[in-house]
Image (cartoon, coloured by chain):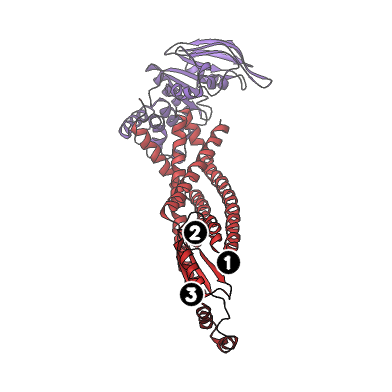
């Protein structure tokens, strides 16, 4: 599914990642952890093509994305869903419109969008709230909208960058349970987090980074 | 799922929505385009009428050839007949000293006693030669010259010196106006580009999210180009309406103030020119949007 082969990334004189090698199989749930500045987010950004490595190869489903042209990125991103710590919801769009955005960009009909949005809002426990604006929701609910948007086009890979970073304990557990459910439906899930408590409560394979190096896998 | 007609529906809806949500910035953009195109239209109307005026002079060129007083009457008539047969000449009218004097007396009624005292041969007899339609007035006048022998004619006046000076003035206006028009267009492009950039900047988070969920570059860019088209179209139509209103109001006022009937001959621009101005407005709108969105995407994360 995902393979990093001797991947390094320098930002000027700073080594964000150094000679990173690992592999994630289809259907796995994997944590990427480590202290701030360890390279977790950089690694995730490389998976969705927002950052290109300075050296090495990244294979996603057998395709070397380091050789991919910018015009190829949209199709790569349509095969994955991304959840951010700050939710990245459009404040002036309703919840339904925010979730439907991922389907809109691929030219889905309005009927399909409505049907799929209702379905994923049910999965994340927000059924019937499609017409509300994001600011009317709690932080946990907004993150669930973000998860709904990430899974609305049924991706094979879900990336979550500190998805519980802005949430309190109960809300964080709710979001993790949703991610776990999505994984049980066959989606590969990569979660960048430094929340040790959650990793203990939901134990999965962990890639531990420190100062840009993969310490343990 | 492949991109199909629904994609265009989504793009169109996004453009409409953005026009509505950023109504003030959009109005600024349309206003700038309208002002630039209106200025161009006023200049072109001025230029068009000057050119029309010059063309009418070229179409109706009259040469006055004044006889020496001692040229006998029969010689004058034979010269008039010979010149009238020339293919470059549309018609020739012989004006005797008496007819010229009567013409003058009619126009300066107050001086009638003075003119009477000076005698009926105050003004020389002349041939008033009207040239046929031509594409080269200068050449025709030059070719006609051998027929106007200085032994018969004291002076030949065709008023071309004045026309030539006026043509030089019109040419200078054309060059200066063209340069100013170009500057106006560049300034408008700059202003509209920055206004559209503000609209895009307002929506930067949305655009970033679109990119992250797999929107193609064309999907992101297209709504802004549609908005630019709408700005241009609305600005262009507004400019043309304003141009029409200016034409009606200004000509009416000048006529009543100056009582100048000649002003009724100030024409509005022909339909093709107006269409050209509308196209220019649309090109300005789409061009500015294109520059703005390209600039934004080049710097966006």
Marks 1 and 3 sit apart, C-alpha to C-alpha, by: 39 Å
Q: Secondary structure at mark 2?
A: helix
Residue A75 position by quadrant:
top left
Which chain: red?
B
The answer to whether marks 2 and 1 mark residues whose Cβ atoms lie closer than 8 Å is no
Residue at x 60% of width, y 59% of height = B169
Tags 2 and 1 on a common chain: yes
Residue at x 45% of width, y 68% of height = B264
**Mark 3, other Cα within 10 Å: few <14 / some 14–19 / many ≥20:** few
Q: Earlier in the sequence, mark 2 or mark 3?
A: 2
Chain where mark 2 sits? B
| Residue B215 in the image: above or below residue A42 | below
**Mark 1, other Cα within 10 Å: few <14 / some 14–19 / many ≥20:** some
**Mark 2, other Cα within 10 Å: few <14 / some 14–19 / many ≥20:** few
State the quadrant of the C terminus of chain A.
top right
Residue carrying label 1: B156
Chain where mark 1 sits? B
The answer to whether marks 2 and 3 mark residues whose Cβ atoms lie closer than 8 Å is no
Q: Nearer the viewer, residue A123 or A41?
A: A41
Marks 2 and 1 sit apart, C-alpha to C-alpha, by: 22 Å
Q: Secondary structure at mark 3?
A: helix
Residue carrying label 2: B55
Residue A99 in sight here: yes
Residue at x 49% of width, y 59% of height = B55
Residue carrying label 3: B256
Q: Nearer the viewer, residue B7 or B213?
A: B7
Residue A115, x across and y down, in percent = 31, 31
């Amino acid at each position: 599914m995902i393979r990093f082969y001797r991947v390094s990334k320098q930002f000027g004189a700073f080594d964000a990642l150094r000679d990173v090698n690992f592999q994630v199989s289809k259907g796995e749930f994997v944590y990427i952890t480590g202290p701030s500045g360890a390279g977790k987010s950089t690694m995730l950004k490389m998976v969705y093509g927002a950052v290109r490595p300075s050296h090495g190869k990244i294979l996603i489903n057998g395709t070397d994305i380091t050789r991919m042209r910018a015009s190829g990125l949209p199709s790569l991103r349509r095969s994955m869903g991304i959840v951010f710590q700050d939710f990245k919801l459009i404040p002036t769009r309703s919840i339904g419109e925010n979730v439907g955005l991922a389907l809109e960009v691929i030219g889905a009909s309005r009927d399909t969008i409505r049907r799929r949005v209702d379905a994923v809002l049910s999965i994340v426990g927000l059924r019937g709230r499609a017409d509300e604006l994001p600011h009317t929701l709690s932080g946990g609910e907004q993150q669930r909208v973000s998860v709904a948007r990430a899974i609305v086009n049924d991706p094979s890979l879900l990336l979550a960058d500190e998805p519980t970073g802005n949430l309190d304990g109960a809300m964080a557990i709710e979001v993790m349970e949703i991610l776990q459910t999505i994984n049980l439906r066959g989606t590969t899930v990569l979660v960048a987090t430094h929340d040790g408590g959650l990793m203990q409560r939901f134990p999965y394979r962990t890639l531990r980074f420190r100062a840009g190096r993969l310490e343990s896998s | 799922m492949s991109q199909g007609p629904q994609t265009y529906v989504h793009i169109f809806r996004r453009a409409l929505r953005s026009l509505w949500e950023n109504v003030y910035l959009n109005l600024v953009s349309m206003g700038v385009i309208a002002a630039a195109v209106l200025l161009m239209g006023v200049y072109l109307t001025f230029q068009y009428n000057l050119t029309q005026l010059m063309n009418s002079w070229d179409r109706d060129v009259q040469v006055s050839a004044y006889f020496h007083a001692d040229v006998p009457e029969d010689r004058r008539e034979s010269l008039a007949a010979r010149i009238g047969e020339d293919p470059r000449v549309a018609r020739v009218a012989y004006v005797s000293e008496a007819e010229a004097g009567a013409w003058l007396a009619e126009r300066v009624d107050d001086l009638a006693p003075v003119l009477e005292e000076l005698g009926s041969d105050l003004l020389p007899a002349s041939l008033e030669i009207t040239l046929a339609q031509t594409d080269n007035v200068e050449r025709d006048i030059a070719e006609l010259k051998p027929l106007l022998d200085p032994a018969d004619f004291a002076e030949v006046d065709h008023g071309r010196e004045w026309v030539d000076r006026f043509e030089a003035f019109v040419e200078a206006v054309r060059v200066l106006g063209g340069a100013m028009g170009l500057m106006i267009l560049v300034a408008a492009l700059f202003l509209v580009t920055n206004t559209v950039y503000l609209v895009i900047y307002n929506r930067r988070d949305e655009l970033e999210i679109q990119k992250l969920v797999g929107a193609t570059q064309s999907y992101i860019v297209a709504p802004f180009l549609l908005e630019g088209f709408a700005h241009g179209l609305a600005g262009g139509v507004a400019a043309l309406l304003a141009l029409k209103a200016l034409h009606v109001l200004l000509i009416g006022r000048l006529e009543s103030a100056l009582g100048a009937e000649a002003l009724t001959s100030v024409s509005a621009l022909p339909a093709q020119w107006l269409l050209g101005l509308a196209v220019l407005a649309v090109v300005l709108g789409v061009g500015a949007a294109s520059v703005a969105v390209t600039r934004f995407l080049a710097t966006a994360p």
